[in-house]
Image (cartoon, rainbow, N blue to C red):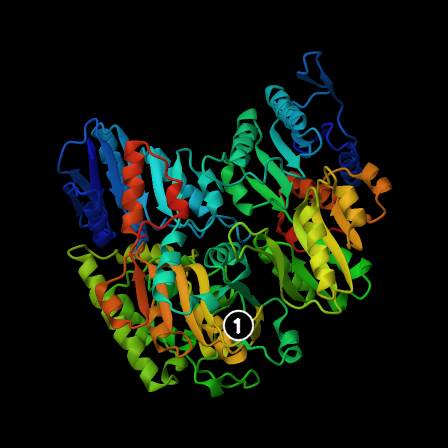
C-alpha cells in the first residue's frame, strides 16, 4: 500500500492560495477540470488517479459562494467514488459560518447544514481557519482543525505597525471582545470595546466606546469584514475619542459591496486582511489594504495532518 | 392539556411541581429506582400510548446520574408508544463544554446532544444555553428560552436605583449577553477583564492592578495528590478550600510577599473563564474518601482565619448530610473502580487546589482590569452561570476597592454554586446580593442559610413554553416579554 502519497486539489475559488500552499509543500497541484454545463450545473473531472491517496481539496468560501460550495462537494464526492483513502477539505474561509445560531425566531442554522453536506459528500476531515464561532466544530461528525490567524496577526502587528507598544486593541462589537482580549493579553496591551448602545427605544443605535484610546494607536480586530460599515463607524468613533491612528486587522476580508469606498473615505489608516479570500484586484483599487499571508499555516497543517503529527503547535506559532 | 403527560425526573422536583401547577395538571406517576450497582430503572405509572410526553429534568450536582435517568425515561416513553417526546431541561448539562477549548479536548455538549437525540426525543426545551450555537448540535428542534425578560422584570420591580446602575460583564466572552441586558434596562455597560497571559510584567506596570498568585498550569497534573483525590470524586476537599477562598483580609493582598500561604492562591481555573466549568465530574464524596482527604498533608489548612474555617466546615458538613440523603440506599462506588481511574487517567475536579503550598514556586499573577466606569454606581456583575465563586469575587473586589463601585449585585441565569462558593459569597463584604433563577436545584438548607441569595422563579416561562408547544403556538413572544407583567 502506498503510504506516503498525497494529492493536493484546488477548486476555482482561490487558485492563488492553492498554488502558494502547494509550492510550500514542494508539490504540484493535481490535475482537475471543473466546468459548467450550459444549464449551470458544475461538472468535475479528476485528471489523475487518487486511488488510496491522501487527498486535500483546497476551496475557500468566497465570491460565487454557492457555486464554489457545490464545486467542493462534487470534488469531494468524485474523490470518494474514485477510492481515495482519506479526503480532507481545506476551507480557509468557511461558508455560511455567520449563520451558526438561531438568533431570530425561525432562523435556519445554515452552518450546520453546510457541515452536514460536507460530511455526507464524503469529507473525512476538515481544516479551516478562524471559524466565526468555534462551536461550529461541534456541527461536524468528522474531525475539524480550526487554525488560528492570531499568530500571524500578532507577527504583523509587531513587524508592521510602528509604535505598536503604544497601541490599544479594540473590538468593534461586544461579541468579539474575547478575541480582542486574547490579542491584547499576548501583546501586553490594553484593550477597549465599542458597544452599540440602544438606550431609548426607536433611537438609532449609537456607538459608545468603553475604554480609553486617547493618543493611542487603535487596532480594531475582528474575524470578518464584509461591507466594512461597522469598521468605518468604529474608526470615526475612535478618532473622535482621540485615537492617533486606527488600524483594522481582520482574518476574512470579504470586502463586498461598497467596502472599498467605505475604507477609502473612512478614518482607517490601514485595513489588513489575510489571504483566505482573494483580494488582489481590490488591493489595486484601494491603497489602504494590506495582506497577511497565511498559506504557510495551511501548508504546515496539511503536512502535519498527512504525517500524523500534532497540529497544536500552529495554534501559537507560525511555521518558518 | 389534552393528551399530554408531564413526568418529572428526580433532579429538580420543586421546579417540576411548579411547572405542573402552572399547567393545571398533576405530574404523572413514575417510579425511578436505583439498583445496588447504581444502575437506574424507570417504570412509568400510567399509559402514554399516543400521548405527548413532557419530561422535566434539569442538570444537578449529580449531573451524570440525572442525565442517565433522563435518557432511560426517554427510552421508556418511546417503548411505551408515546406520540411525541419533549424534554424540558432548564439547565442543560455539559453546556459549558460546547467547543474544543483545549488541544485534544472534547465537545462534550455535542456528545450529550447526540445521546439525547439517539434516545428518542422529538423536541427539546431548555433555557439560556451557554452558547446559542449549541442549537446546531441537535438533529431535533430546540427552543432555547431566555431568562433575560424575567430577570429584567425582577430588576425593574425590586431594584430601586436600577436606572443609574452599570451592567458589568464578568469576562469578555459574555460581553454580548450583558450588552443585551444593558440595552433592555437602558443602562451603561462595562467589562471586567482578567489578564493572565503576561502577568509578571504587568504587575509593576499598573499600580491599580490586583495581583494574585495562582497555580502554574500543569501543577495539578503533576501533583501526587491530584489523581488520588480526584479518583475519590471529591468535589472540594476541606484541605483544598482554604487557599481557594478569596475572602481575604486586605493586608493579605500583597503581591510581593512570598511566604504568605494563606489566601494567596486564586485558582487558575477561577481566573480563566473557560476553566471553571468542570465541576460536574463528581460531587458525591464518599465518607471514606472524605476521611482520606483529611489525612493528606496540607499546611494551608492551618493558616486561614478561624471564622472562615468554621463557615467552610459548616458548609461541608451540610453538604455531606445532603449527599447522604441523596444517596439513600445506594451502594457506594466500589474501590476497584476508583483504582481504575487512579491509574494513568487523572480525574481532576476543578477547582481542586490540593497542592502543598511549597509547590507554588512558579508563581503566576493576574491583573484585573475594568474597561468602563463604575464610580459610585450600583453594579450588576453578570455572567450566564455561577459555579465557583472566585472569579466573581475577584471582579467584585476590584470593582469596589479599586474602581469605587457603590454596591455590587451578582446576576446569573444558572446558579450552580459548586463546592462552598455560596458560603464564600456570603462572607465576601464586597458582594451585596446574588440573583439567580431556579433552573438548577439548590438544597433548601443552602438557600435558607444565605442572606444574599435571591432566586427568581422561571417555572412560569417553562410551563408557558410547554403549553405553547403543545398547542402549536409560537414561542417567540417568550424571548422578549416577561410573563409576570
| Figure check: A279 above or below A79 | below
Direction bottom: furthest residue: B251
Residue B442 occupies quadrant: bottom left
| Figure check: B285 above or below B475 | below
Q: Going by the image, does A260 lie left or right of A51? A: right
- Where does the image place residue B203, in percent across and percent down from the top left? 62, 78
Q: Looking at the image, can residue B479 be seen?
A: yes
Please give the count of numbered marks on the rendered protein: 1
Q: Looking at the image, can residue B223 be seen?
A: no
- Camera-side residue: B141 or B367? B141
Please state, as top left, top right, bottom left or bottom right, where the N terminus of chain A lies in the image.
top right
- Where does the image place residue B325, in percent across and percent down from the top left? 18, 61
Residue drawn at the location 40% of the way across and 75% of the way down: B245
- Camera-side residue: A59 or B396? B396
Residue B2 occupies quadrant: top left
Chain to which the residue tagged by mark 1 belongs: B
- Where does the image place residue A115, in percent across and percent down from the top left? 54, 33
Q: Going by the image, does B156 lie left or right of A231? A: left
Q: Secondary structure at mark 1?
A: loop
Mark 1 nearby-residue class (10 Å; few <14, some 14–19, many ≥20): many
Q: Badge 1 is on which residue? A: B374
- Where does the image place residue B196, in percent across and percent down from the top left? 58, 68
| Figure check: B333 above or below A54 | below
Residue drawn at the location 52% of the way across and 45% of the way down: A135
Q: Going by the image, does A25 lie left or right of B268? A: right
- Camera-side residue: B253 or A38? A38
Amino acid at each position: 500500500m502506498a503510504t506516503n502519497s498525497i494529492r493536493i486539489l484546488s477548486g476555482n475559488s482561490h487558485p492563488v492560495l492553492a498554488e502558494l500552499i502547494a509550492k510550500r509543500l514542494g508539490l504540484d497541484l493535481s490535475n482537475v477540470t471543473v466546468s459548467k454545463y450550459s444549464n449551470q450545473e458544475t461538472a468535475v473531472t479528476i485528471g489523475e488517479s487518487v486511488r488510496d491517496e491522501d487527498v486535500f481539496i483546497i476551496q475557500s468560501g468566497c465570491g460565487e459562494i454557492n457555486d464554489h460550495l457545490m464545486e467542493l462537494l462534487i470534488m469531494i464526492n468524485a474523490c470518494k467514488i474514485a477510492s481515495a483513502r482519506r479526503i480532507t477539505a481545506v476551507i480557509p474561509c468557511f461558508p455560511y459560518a455567520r449563520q451558526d445560531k438561531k438568533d431570530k425566531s425561525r432562523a435556519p442554522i445554515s452552518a450546520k447544514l453546510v457541515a452536514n453536506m460536507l460530511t455526507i459528500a464524503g469529507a473525512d476531515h476538515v481544516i479551516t481557519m478562524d471559524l466565526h464561532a468555534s462551536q461550529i466544530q461541534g456541527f461536524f461528525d468528522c474531525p475539524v482543525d480550526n487554525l488560528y490567524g492570531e499568530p500571524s496577526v500578532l507577527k504583523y502587528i509587531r513587524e508592521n505597525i510602528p509604535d505598536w507598544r503604544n497601541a490599544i486593541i479594540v473590538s468593534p462589537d461586544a461579541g468579539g471582545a474575547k478575541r480582542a482580549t486574547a490579542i491584547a493579553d499576548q501583546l501586553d496591551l490594553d484593550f477597549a470595546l465599542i458597544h452599540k448602545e440602544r438606550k431609548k427605544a426607536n433611537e438609532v443605535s449609537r456607538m459608545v466606546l468603553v475604554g480609553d484610546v486617547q493618543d493611542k494607536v487603535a487596532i480594531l480586530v475582528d474575524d470578518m469584514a464584509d461591507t466594512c460599515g461597522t469598521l468605518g463607524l468604529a474608526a470615526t468613533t475612535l478618532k473622535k475619542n482621540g485615537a492617533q491612528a486606527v488600524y483594522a486587522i481582520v482574518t476574512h476580508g470579504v470586502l463586498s459591496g461598497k467596502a472599498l469606498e467605505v475604507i477609502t473615505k473612512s478614518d482607517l489608516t490601514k485595513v489588513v486582511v489575510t489571504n483566505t479570500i482573494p483580494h488582489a484586484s481590490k488591493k489595486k483599487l484601494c491603497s489602504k489594504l494590506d495582506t497577511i499571508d497565511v498559506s504557510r499555516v495551511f501548508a504546515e497543517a496539511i503536512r502535519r495532518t498527512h504525517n500524523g503529527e500534532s497540529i497544536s503547535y500552529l495554534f501559537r506559532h507560525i511555521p518558518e | 392539556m389534552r393528551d399530554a403527560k408531564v413526568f418529572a425526573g428526580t433532579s429538580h422536583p420543586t421546579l417540576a411541581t411548579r411547572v405542573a401547577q402552572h399547567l393545571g395538571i398533576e405530574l404523572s406517576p413514575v417510579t425511578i429506582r436505583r439498583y445496588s450497582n447504581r444502575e437506574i430503572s424507570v417504570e412509568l405509572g400510567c399509559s402514554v400510548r399516543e400521548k405527548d410526553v413532557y419530561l422535566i429534568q434539569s442538570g444537578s450536582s449529580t449531573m451524570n446520574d440525572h442525565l442517565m435517568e433522563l435518557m432511560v425515561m426517554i427510552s421508556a416513553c418511546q417503548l411505551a408508544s408515546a406520540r411525541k417526546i419533549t424534554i424540558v431541561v432548564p439547565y442543560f448539562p455539559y453546556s459549558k463544554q460546547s467547543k474544543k477549548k483545549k488541544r485534544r479536548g472534547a465537545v462534550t455538549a455535542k456528545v450529550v446532544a447526540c445521546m439525547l437525540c439517539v434516545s428518542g426525543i422529538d423536541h427539546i426545551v431548555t433555557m439560556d444555553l451557554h452558547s446559542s450555537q449549541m442549537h446546531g448540535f441537535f438533529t431535533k428542534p430546540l427552543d432555547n428560552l431566555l431568562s433575560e425578560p424575567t430577570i429584567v422584570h425582577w430588576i425593574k420591580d425590586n431594584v430601586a436605583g436600577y436606572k443609574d446602575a452599570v451592567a458589568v460583564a464578568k469576562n469578555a466572552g459574555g460581553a454580548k449577553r450583558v450588552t443585551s441586558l444593558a440595552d433592555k434596562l437602558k443602562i451603561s455597560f462595562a467589562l471586567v477583564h482578567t489578564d493572565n497571559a503576561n502577568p509578571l510584567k504587568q504587575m509593576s506596570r499598573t499600580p491599580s492592578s490586583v495581583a494574585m498568585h495562582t497555580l502554574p498550569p500543569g501543577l495539578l497534573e503533576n501533583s501526587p495528590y491530584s489523581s488520588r483525590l480526584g479518583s475519590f470524586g471529591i468535589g472540594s476537599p476541606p484541605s483544598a478550600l482554604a487557599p481557594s477562598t478569596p475572602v481575604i483580609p486586605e493586608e493579605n493582598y500583597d503581591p510581593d510577599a512570598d511566604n504568605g500561604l494563606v489566601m494567596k492562591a486564586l485558582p487558575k481555573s477561577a481566573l480563566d473563564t473557560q476553566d471553571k466549568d468542570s465541576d460536574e465530574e463528581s460531587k458525591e464524596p464518599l465518607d471514606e474518601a472524605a476521611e482520606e482527604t483529611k489525612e493528606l498533608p496540607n499546611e494551608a489548612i492551618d493558616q486561614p482565619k478561624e471564622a472562615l474555617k468554621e463557615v467552610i466546615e459548616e458548609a461541608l458538613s451540610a453538604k455531606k448530610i445532603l449527599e447522604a440523603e441523596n444517596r439513600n440506599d445506594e451502594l457506594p462506588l466500589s474501590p476497584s473502580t476508583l483504582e481504575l481511574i487512579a491509574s494513568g487517567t487523572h480525574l481532576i475536579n476543578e477547582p481542586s487546589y490540593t497542592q502543598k503550598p511549597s509547590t507554588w514556586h512558579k508563581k503566576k499573577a493576574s491583573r484585573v482590569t475594568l474597561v468602563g466606569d463604575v464610580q459610585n454606581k450600583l453594579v450588576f456583575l453578570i455572567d450566564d452561570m455561577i459555579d465557583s465563586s472566585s472569579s466573581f469575587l475577584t471582579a467584585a473586589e476590584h470593582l469596589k476597592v479599586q474602581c469605587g463601585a457603590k454596591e455590587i449585585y451578582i446576576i446569573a441565569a444558572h446558579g450552580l454554586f459548586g463546592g462552598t462558593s455560596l458560603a464564600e459569597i456570603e462572607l465576601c463584604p464586597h458582594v451585596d446580593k446574588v440573583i439567580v433563577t431556579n433552573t438548577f436545584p439548590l438544597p433548601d438548607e443552602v438557600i435558607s442559610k444565605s442572606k444574599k441569595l435571591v432566586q427568581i422563579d422561571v417555572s412560569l416561562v417553562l410551563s408557558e413554553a410547554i403549553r405553547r408547544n403543545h398547542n402549536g403556538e409560537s414561542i417567540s413572544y417568550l424571548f422578549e416579554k416577561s410573563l409576570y407583567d
